[in-house]
Image (cartoon, rainbow, N blue to C red):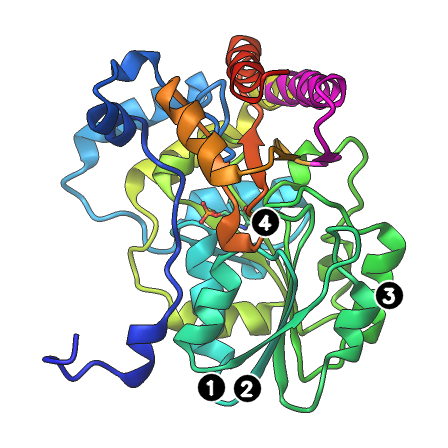
Amino acid sequence: MSAHPFNPHVATLPVYIPGRPIEEVARELGLDPTGVIKLASNENPLGPSPRALAAMDRTLKSLHLYPDGSAFQLKRALAQRLGVDSSNLILGNGSNEIIEFLGHAFLRPGDEVVVSEYCFAVYPIVAALFGTRLVTVPAQRFGADIPGMLRAITPATRMLFLANPNNPTGTLATREEIAALLAGVPRHVVLVLDEAYVEFLEDPADGLALIRAGTHPNVIVMRTFSKIFGLAGLRLGYGVAQPELIAGLERIRQPFNINSLAQAGALAALEDADHLEATRVNNRKGLDDLQSAFAKMGLEYIPSFANFVMVRVGDGARVFVELQRRGVITRPTAGYALPEWLRITVGLPAENHRCLEALREILGR
Ligand SMILES: *Cc1c(COP(=O)(O)O)cnc(C)c1O
């Protein structure tokens, strides 16, 4: 690295380690890829909506044309569904891109960014990318300590991230805690509420009410098509905020960041309520099955509100490798300072069963 004049912070940037792709694991271990299952990245085990697939198929023959840079149709449909205006929406190449827009828009070297212990790995990376100081507030029983996060705010704080439910822990802050957060965050701090898993909740609070009310110019709610919508490979996420904040982020966005297939696929996926409901049903049952099996095996787990669950297996790195050898890809969490745990995504019933059988064999339970 020293041969090139990189910016000084580049060498020390934390690196995001994604869930391992099926093909890569199969190649490495000499396994048949069709026999490998991936429960590592909180993807939808039912796959994409068939309606999304059909819509993208119809779009293929127009791929010589640039996409609509304003994503007019998709934004209009999304706004309608969310009960907001198109001017409240920004689309990103995954919600990860929106996190980066926020960095460009608001973060400068020396600023402070407040997160919770066990927060989503992308927040510390973006904080470091923009030379800010990360202030990590210790978690309480794996969940965010919201009063503690509010106390961590100083005049130098520019941004506070909270994922709810949180990844990787699957914990959920209560409505009261979120209300306290909204009431307590000062205007000089941008509050990023990351709702990547909100659609999995049985009884979700209406996180967009405050956007409709126009009361919180410094709050942005983020969601994604990567999780319940089953379109992680398309890369599409969105942010919902006051038009002024959105207009600032729009200036940063590259003109064609949302490709034509993503626009068509997401538009159709939005209409497919059956697919969403089937995904919710599969998830509820699968989460119950996994958690009750862990309890029977005497394994500690963190009760989850999302489509994955953290389980304490002892030597997480070893169990990860052993599972992988049996064709089951999970997510090790040593990078989150949880080396005794694994994060397992809820799969189809047969996939959950296979993962549990492998775990029983490895752990001798
Ligand atoms: C998966 C996830 C996202 C979504 O990422 P995309 O870039 O939209 O695929 C955002 N936040 C959290 C907490 C997540 O777990």
Which amino acid is tagged 2? Answer: Asp
Camera-side residue: 227 or 290?
290
Mark 3–mark 1 Cα distance, whole angstroms, equals: 27 Å
Question: In the displayed image of the protein, which residue is found farthest to the front?
Answer: 364
Left or right relative to 201: residue 277: left
The crowd level at tag 3 (other Cα within 10 Å; few <14, some 14-19, many 20+) is some
Residue 131 appears in the figure? yes
First in residue order: circle 2 vs circle 3: 2
- The image's mark for residue 108 is 1
Name the residue tied to disc 2. Answer: 111
Look at the image and say whether residue 287 sits in the magenta stretch. yes
For the stretch drawn in magenta, what is the main secondary structure?
Answer: helix
| Mark toward the start of the polypeptide (1 vs 4) | 1
Give how far across and how far down residue 194 sits, in percent: 62, 54
Q: Identify which amino acid the numbered label 1 is placed on.
A: Arg
Image depth: mark 1 or mark 4 in front: 4
Q: Is residue 189 magenta?
A: no
Q: Earlier in the sequence, mark 3 or mark 4?
A: 3
Q: Position of residue 72 (x, y in %)?
A: 43, 49
Q: CA distance from mark 2 to mark 4?
A: 28 Å
Q: Nearer the viewer, mark 2 or mark 3?
A: 2
Mark 2–mark 3 Cα distance, whole angstroms, equals 23 Å
If the image is split into quadrants, where does the C terminus sit?
top right
User: Which residue type does callout 3 highlight?
Assistant: Ala
Q: Which residues are magenta?
A: 279-305
Number of numbered discs on residues? 4
